[in-house]
Structures are given as structure tokens and as C-alpha cells.
Amino acid sequence: MTAQLTPSTRAWGPPALVVGAVLVGLVVAAALLSFVWTPYDAVQIDPAARIAPPSSAHWLGTDRFGRDVLSQLLVGARTTLFVGVIAVGLAGVIGTPLGILAAMGPRWLGELLMRTSDLVLAFPALLLAIMFGAVYGPSTLTAMVAIGIATAPSFARLARSGALQVLATEYVLAARAAGRPRTAIAVRHVLPNIAGLLLVQASVSFAIAVLAEAALSFLGFGTRPPTPSWGRMLQEAQQLLYTAPELSLWPGLAIALAVLGFNLLGDGLRDRFDPRLAGRR
Amino acid sequence: MGALTVLLQLVRRTAVFAVSLVVASVVVFAFMTVLPGDPARVALGINATEEAVAATRAAFGTDRPLVVQYLDWVSGLPSGDFGRSYVTEVDIGPQIIDRLLVTTWLVLSGMAVALLVALPLGVLAAVRHRRPSGTLISAFSQVGVAVPSFLAGILLVTVFAVRLGWLPSGGWTPPAQDPVAFLSMLVLPALALGLVQGAVLTRYVRSAVLDVLREDYLRTARSKGLTPGRALVRHGLRNAAVPVVTVLGLQLSTLLIGAVVVERVFVIPGLGSLLLDGVANRDLLLVQGVVIVLVLAVLVVNFLVDVAYTVLDPRLRRAA
């Protein structure tokens, strides 16, 4: 599709980058903190303290098994980031070379690769993960692979359009005329010039991965118990809506803030890196 | 020349669409039938005799070559024949069609909510660009984008079902059976799906209207004496509609997948619930059927968007 379908978020400007970076920083800090300290063992069941309201002992209360909510949230941040890093990494590693190949290779190959990516887009991450789960059994691994495959086309498209622009520049034409091999041009000229755009895409894809992981864990297709995950915390809390509605608040807030953070970070980075937006408005 | 170009474009897109349908069906079949192994063995368990497995294979039709099995499956799809479940031994087609109807209600009402939210807010945000109210709307949509629909569903249930007791927390009644109960049960899931998509759509509407506001023809219209509002309504909104329609089409597929999760939140017997039940029961032929329906729906919507795009926008008629 040729029309620019990226919504304008210019009204935000630099604050987007700052707020996004702070929110993402909080998630990363929570995940790192969970390695060295949590108030309680996140998976420790305590029948005596089931569904306890927030107190000095349990700052955010406990769930129906008496597990400390804050500890679960902290370890859940680790799960979220782990799934996001692997899924987005996979998407980038698959999508980027294929996108550059589509731009630099023969026309038919480019067409074939782009049609294939269109087809993959018809399988949304959630559906793909459910299919993987049906065949191989649900797990964090199937969720990550499915999310990675489903988001790879966005990297491929971006890498292709970015590479096409770089390939049309004079210094690349000069390099070609000088007889430099294609792989050298791809690595020396194309990749560094589209790295910024790819970083933007990585941030936006990370938000999608966080959402998908949460939805999958909510449905029971993602992280398996007892490993804490925000999506499953939400699913468990939903069963207690009438007795302890506040239990759904914390994981819900964590998911929303993490997604907001990665989206804003992506927007902020786009303002910096996207040459098409430079000087507009 | 213009008409011919458009026609050629449409032929090309139709051909791509047809190939996509075939490839998608092959992929789904290969994934769900070839990868998991022998359904006869799964059905009978590990202690079954070879004779029993062979007999069950013959009964299932899985002793035939894969190509024959694929052709048999895919040729039944247009008439709604999705085969017979190996697990429940019930025809899959009627179940899918029943559930599809429920999910369609959900998706269309979600889309209606999204439009009701996004059109006024998006236009307002564009017109009030760089003013507090415009920025506030942008902030709302940015936050809305970050809330997954199942979370919105849980929050809505907490407020309107648990706290206020105004609406049921879940369930489903067909409209023909009890229209009032049907509507009361549809409200919260439709809001859960629609508000989030509305937040996404608001950004696109704002962006599209902002672009139009900068166009020369709008300045011309205003110089002829039209007020900004009238100029926008008379000349701007139709042009802003092209990108918005595209996004709307693409969002339809998001809504369809979102419905899978929202159905779980509200215990609605739609296609999503059928899919998840199928996975839970290891009923892979049923899963295969639901998956192909969802994927075909996405492909058809994308195709229609492409066609609308080609026909609507003269500037794009020559674009590949």
C-alpha cells in the first residue's frame, strides 16, 4: 500500500519520547529488581493470607492462593520483557534480511516475498499462537515464536521500503558503479541507514508483543503456571471480580502502562529517525 | 485510459486474492492436519491394535493420500461442509455457522461503537489541533490504544455489572428469543471491543482530517466564503474518508480476533469460544475449520479494502 497510513502523533513531540522512556524504564527496572529482590517469593502459596487487602505486610494485597501481588507483578515484568525481546528479536532477524533481499534481489523475488508477507499478515499473532498451541501444546515458547512470525512482515516491509530509498541515493549508485558486491552494500550502506527506522518498528512491535502475550496468557495459551505473568494474573483476578475487584486493577495497569510506554517510545523515536517526517509540521 | 487502468488493477488484485485464498487453505491444512500426526491414533490411545487404528483411519478417511484429503476438505468449504469432528463425531459446519452469527453481531456492534467514538473525536481533535481540547483527545486515544479489549471488558464488568448492577456480566441470548436481554448482554462486550478500536481509529481520523485541512482546495473553499466547518463538511470529509475506510477495513480483522478474547471474558458462545474449546478438546479438525473461516474473513476484508481503495482514489489508481 502506498498511502501513508501512519497516524500523526506530532502533537506529542519530545514529551512522548521522555514519557515513553520513563515507562519502559520502569518495566525494565521492575524486571531487573525481581532478580535480586521481591517482597515475597512470587509463587509462594500462603493459605492463611488469601485475598488479603493491601497492608504493610502485602503492599498490593494477595491473590486467592495468598501469593503476594507486588512480587508477582515484579516477576511478571520479567516474563513480559523476555517474551517481547525474543519475539521482536525473532521478527527482526527474519523480517529485516528478507525485506532487504526483496529490495535488492530480482523483481520476481521481491514480489514473491512481499506477497508472502501479505499472506502472513492474514494470520494475526493471536490466531497463529492458538494454532501453535493446538498442535504443540501452549507454552511461552510457542507464544514467542508465533508473535515473532506474525510481526516479521512489518519489519520486512519497512526494511524493503527503507532499502529502496537508500539504494536510490548517489553514494550507493557510486558504490555499485565501483563494483562493490551486493552483500557489502547491504551491510555497509543499507543496514546502518535503516537502523533508526527498525528501532522505531522494534518499539512498536514490542507493544504489540506485550499485548499479545497478555492476551495469550489470559486465554491460557501463553506462560504456564506457576510462572507469574500479567495476563494470567488478570485471568485469575477475573474469577474474583465480585469478591476482590481490585485484584484485576494491578496487572491491568501494568499491561496498559507497558504498552503505552513502548508506543510512546516508538512515536518519540519516529520523530527522530523518520526522514519523511523531518521538517513536516 | 483511466478506466482501463482501474480494470487491470482490479483483475490483478483479484488474481492475487484468489492465489492467497488457495495458499492460505494449504497452509492451514498442512499446519493442522499434517503436523499433529495421526488423528486415529490420538482418538484410540496408545494401546490400540494396528487393526483398530487402520479401521478408524478408514472411517475418518485419513488413510487416503494427503492431496485427496486436502481437496476433499477444501471443496466442501464453499457449501459450509467442514467435515465431521474426529472427537465429537458431530458435523463441524453447522456449529461454525451458528457461532459465526454470534461473533458477527459482536464485531459489527463493536465497529459501530468505534465509529461513534472515533468520527466526532477525531474530527474535533484535528480542528482543535494544538489547542488543549485537541491535545486531550489525542492523549485519550493514546491511552486507549494501550488498553487491550479484554482488560476494557473486565473494567466495564467491574463498574457496570459488579458495582452498579446495571448490566449482566456475561452470557448470550439470541435476538429472536428475547431482544431486550440480547441488547443488555451485547452492550458491555460491544463497548469493550469498540472503545479500544475507537481509540485507535481516532488517531487515523485526526491524521486524515489534519492532512485535508492543509489542502489547497479547502483554502479555496474558504476563500469562497464558506465557514471552516462548512468547508470541511462539503469538501474535506469525503477526501479524509479514503484513508479512514482503509483503516476501518483493516480494523475489522483486528475486531474479529479481539472478539475471540472478549468472548472468553463475557462467556459468549461465538467463534472464539468454539476455537478455544476445540483446542482444549484436541479437536483439531474443528480448530482447522474455525481458523480457515477467520483467515478467509481477514483475506476477504483486505481484498474489499483494496478494491475500494483502487476505485475510490484516483491518485492511487496507478499505484501498484
Image: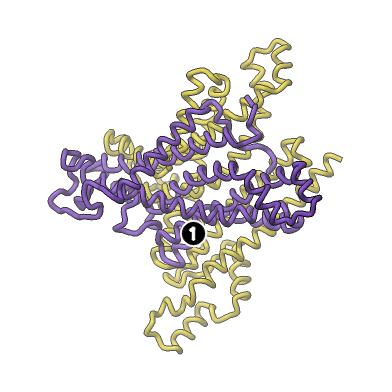
Chain colours: A purple, B yellow
> Where's the C terminus of chain A, which quadrant?
top right
Which residue is rendered at x = 58% and y = 80% of the image?
A: B64
Q: Is residue B219 above or below residue B304?
A: above
> Where's the N terminus of chain A, which quadrant?
top right
Q: Is residue B277 left or right of residue B135?
A: left
Please provide percent x and percent y for residue B49.
41, 88
Label 1 marks a residue whose chain is: A
Q: Is residue A272 left or right of residue B98?
A: right
Marker count (numbered): 1
Crowding near pointer 1: few (<14 within 10 Å), some, many (20+)? many
Which image quarter: residue B273? bottom left
Which residue is rendered at x = 37% and y = 42% of the image?
A: A27
Please provide percent x and percent y for residue B30.
57, 69
Q: Is residue A184 left or right of residue B121?
A: right
Q: Residue furthest left?
A: A48
Please provide percent x and percent y for residue A133.
44, 62
Q: Nearer the viewer, residue B197 or B146?
A: B146
Q: Residue furthest top?
A: B225
Q: Nearer the viewer, residue A90 or B308?
A: A90
Q: Residue furthest right?
A: B1
Q: Amino acid at mark 1?
A: Val
Which residue is rendered at x = 19% and y = 46% of the image?
A: A51
- Please, what secondary structure does the residue beneath circle 1 have? helix
Task: Evaluate whether residue A245 shows in this view.
Answer: yes
Q: Is residue B137 above or below residue B49?
A: above
Q: Which residue is mark 1?
A: A145
Please provide percent x and percent y for residue B23.
64, 62
Which residue is rendered at x = 73% and y = 55% of the image?
A: A182
Task: Evaluate whether residue B296 shows in this view.
Answer: no
